[in-house]
Each structure stands twice: as structure tokens, then as C-alpha cells.
Image (spheres, rainbow, N blue to C red):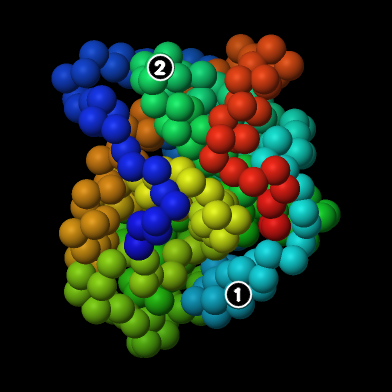
Amino acid sequence: MIAVENQAPVSENAIPKDASDGFVVPESNAFGQSFRDYESTVRLSIVENTYRLNHINQTYDFVKRTREEYAKLNKAEMSIWEAIELLDSFVDESDPDLEEPQIQHLLQSAEAIRKDYPNEDWMHLTALIHDVGKVLYHSKFGSLPQWALVGDTHPVGCAFDESIVYHKYFKENPDYNNPAYNTKLGVYSEGCGLENVLMSWGHDDYMYMVAKANGTTLPSAALFTIRYHSFYPMHTEGAYKYLMNEEDRENLKWVLTFNKYDLYSKSNVHIDVEKVKPYYESLIKKYFPEKLRW
Ligand SMILES: O[C@H]1[C@H](O)[C@@H](O)[C@H](O)[C@@H](O)[C@H]1O
Ligand SMILES: [Fe+2]
Ligand SMILES: [Fe+2]
């Protein structure tokens, strides 16, 4: 990713904390189960079905076409907060750990990271908006089905790594047997950089596009985090490293820091939206124009 001039630099104090930072990983999620357990989550049938459809339908062609369509940013014009409010009853069907509306997840992750990094307002805002791309479900944004906007992401145009959850369903994806797309590198070259890799379509890449095209002043670490936060096969499983370049490796530490707050803040205890709204509105104002093209 290329850092553009209007992006704020990251301050020294914001050096990501490492494993020894005292972050306590909770033992179980809101259902009393372990996090990211795709075999026995209470939401198994809905989660598995969402991934089944995702893996069958997210072909290289589908992603290319859909990305081009959304790059036009001609779907809606609204503020970040208005988009957040569209998520006040949207429940993510790919998530084994959460059954609350996404507006709660946004605030829960933002409040959690704010507690540990009180002076890094850009991290609070990154958390607040990281999943706002899920507005793709809404009729104003083309009513995409959930398999086309939620879940972990992975590259298309090269072999599907074994570490991707519910990997078995790729066998029904036409790209699985296409020799142009089913080798280790596929259409890519070693070290080409994630910037040049087409990722399965979803809320990450969409929100990245929206933020970037509307001239956000968030630092490039924030944009990278938004864009790749669902790329668990890379950031958690260590797959596809050969596609990364130096800049990606540098940015990876931010995604890993952010990931703890994204994943482990999931809870059924609701945050009072109106109470925290003024603070987040002030951050949005600092880093974004009032109305954005979506
Ligand atoms: O189910 C979740 C959810 O869709 C998140 O928004 C996404 O970032 C995660 O990668 C995924 O596991
Ligand atoms: Fe997400
Ligand atoms: Fe999230």
C-alpha cells in the first residue's frame, strides 16, 4: 500500500504492544465456548452455510467484477455515523462468537482498544469503522448476500490455502480446478505485495476503498488494518507470506495488535450508543469529510 501525503504519521507511543504487554486473552466467548471454534460453535449451521456459499461463489471473476462495480462509489452519499447506524440490527452470519448487532461490535472493539491505548485516537477510530463495510448488505448498497461481505478473507487467483476455515467447500468453486488459478502463485509473483493481490470480496476491501477514495487522513497503518483484518490465513495462520513485500510485513504488526481487540471484545453486554456517540463523532470529524461517497 502506498502512503499518501495527507495521511497522519503514527506517533512513537503507539508502537504495538507485543505478547508481553499484559493483554489477557479471555478463555471463552459469550457462549462459554472457545473463540473461533468452527466445529462446535452454537451457531454452527448458519456459520458453516455462510462459508460454504462464500467458498463456492467467490471466484476470481466474481471478485474482479464486484470490486470494479463498488470502486465507482456511486451507491450512496452519507456520513460515517449514518453508515454505522445502518448496522444497528445487522447480525453477521459468519461469526461463531457473536450474535449481537454489528453496531455493538464496532463500539465494543473501539472502547476496548481505547482503554489500552488512550492517546491513540486513530486506533479508536480504526476499530470503530473496521467493519462498517458490512453496509453492503443494505438495499442502498446493493443488498449483497452475506457470503459476499462477511467472513475471513483469502486471495483469489491462486490456490486456496488449507488453513482457510471450511476449506473443503472450495472443491465446488470453479477456480479450484482451473490451472490458471490453482497453483501456489497462480496469477501472482513472489513478493508482489498484497496491494497487487485480489482478495475475496467483502467488508474489508470495501471500507478500505471508501476511506481512501474519500481522502481520510488516518495513517496508512489504519488503512492496512481495515483492509486485511479478516485475512486470518495470513495474519494468524502465517499462510501466503510469499505474496507479501517489506511494507506488508511492517504493517502486519498493527493488524495483530488490532486483532486482539476485534476478536476478544465480543460480548453480549451492550454499550450505550448515545453516550459514546459524541466522542466518536469528534474523531470522525477529525479524520473524514462530513459526507462520503460510498
Ligand atoms: O466472522 C468474522 C466477521 O465477519 C468479521 O467481521 C471478520 O473480520 C472476521 O474475519 C470473521 O471471522
Ligand atoms: Fe471484520
Ligand atoms: Fe470486527
Rendering quarter of residue 26: top left
Please give the residue where the numbered disc 1 appears in the rendered image: 68
The three-letter code of the residue at mark 2 reads: Pro
The residue at the point 39 percent across, 20 percent down is 119
The residue at the point 36 percent across, 57 percent down is 3
Figure quadrant of the C terminus? bottom right
Please give the residue where the numbered disc 2 appears in the rendered image: 118
Observer-nearest residue: 90 or 121? 121
The three-letter code of the residue at mark 1 reads: Glu
Observer-nearest residue: 56 or 109? 109
Dot 1 or dot 2, earlier in sequence: 1
What is the secondary structure assignment of the residue under circle 1?
helix
Q: CA distance from mark 1 to mark 2?
A: 38 Å
Q: Is residue 254 above or below residue 276?
A: below
What is the secondary structure assignment of the residue under circle 2?
loop
Asked whether mark 1 and ligand 2 are closer than 8 Å, the reply comes as no
- Residue 141 lies, in percent from the top left, at 76, 57
- Residue 92 lies, in percent from the top left, at 63, 39
Kindly tell me whether residue 8 is visible in this rendering.
Answer: yes
Figure quadrant of the N terminus? bottom left
Please tell me how crowded label 1 is: few (under 14), some (14-19), or many (20+) other residues with Cα within 10 Å.
Answer: few
Please tell me how crowded label 2 is: few (under 14), some (14-19), or many (20+) other residues with Cα within 10 Å.
Answer: few
